[in-house]
Amino acid sequence: MAEEPTIRMRGSQGCAPTLSLEGREIRADKGGIFTVPEGARETLERHGFKVVEPKP
């Protein structure tokens, strides 16, 4: 079974360093960025998360 593609997202200022998504706990990296399944994008955007573009 192939892994679902992921994206990097950042929560709003003051966001907790962990989030619970579909029963899984996801921890932000030291920069406050979460690596989440691509399918969670819309849900997280409704909660104020923004996609972080990869560094060039």
Image (tube, grey):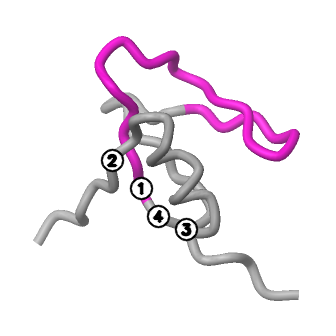
Magenta stretch: give its range: 8-27
Answer yes or no: do the residues labelled 1 and 4 have beta carbons within 8 Å?
yes
Residue 52 coordinates in the image, percent (x, y): 28, 54
Q: Secondary structure at mark 2?
A: strand
Crowding at dot 4, Cα within 10 Å, few <14 / some 14-19 / many 20+, comes out as: some
Residues at marks 2 and 3, CA–CA distance in whole angstroms: 14 Å
Magenta span has 17? yes
Q: Residues within 10 Å of mark 3 (few under 14, many from 20)?
A: some
Location of mark 1 (residue): 8
The residue pinned by badge 2 equals 50
Position of 18 with respect to 56 (left or right) is right
In the picture provided, is 42 more to the left or to the right than 12?
Answer: right
Labels 4, 2: front one: 2
Dot 3 and dot 4 residues touching (CB under 8 Å):
yes
Circle nearer the viewer, 1 or 2: 2
Between discs 1 and 2, the one toward the N terminus: 1
List the single residue furthest toward the front.
Answer: 46
Q: Categorize mark 1 by other alpha carbons within 10 Å: few (<14), some (14-19), many (20+).
A: some
Q: Quick one: label 2, few (<14), some, or many (20+) residues within 10 Å? A: some
Q: Amino acid at mark 3?
A: Thr
Q: Which residue is mark 4?
A: 7
Residue contact at pointers 1 and 3, CB within 8 angstroms? yes
Name the amino acid type tagged 2: Lys
Amino acid, disc 1: Arg
Quadrant in the picture for residue 33? top left
Query: Which numbered disc, 4 or 2, marks the residue that appears first in the sequence?
Result: 4
Residue farthest to the top?
14
Q: Secondary structure at mark 1?
A: strand
User: CA gap, disc 1 to disc 3?
Assistant: 7 Å
Q: Label 3 near label 2: C-beta < 8 Å?
A: no
Quadrant in which the N terminus is drawn: bottom right
| Depicted 48 relative to depicted 1: above or below | above
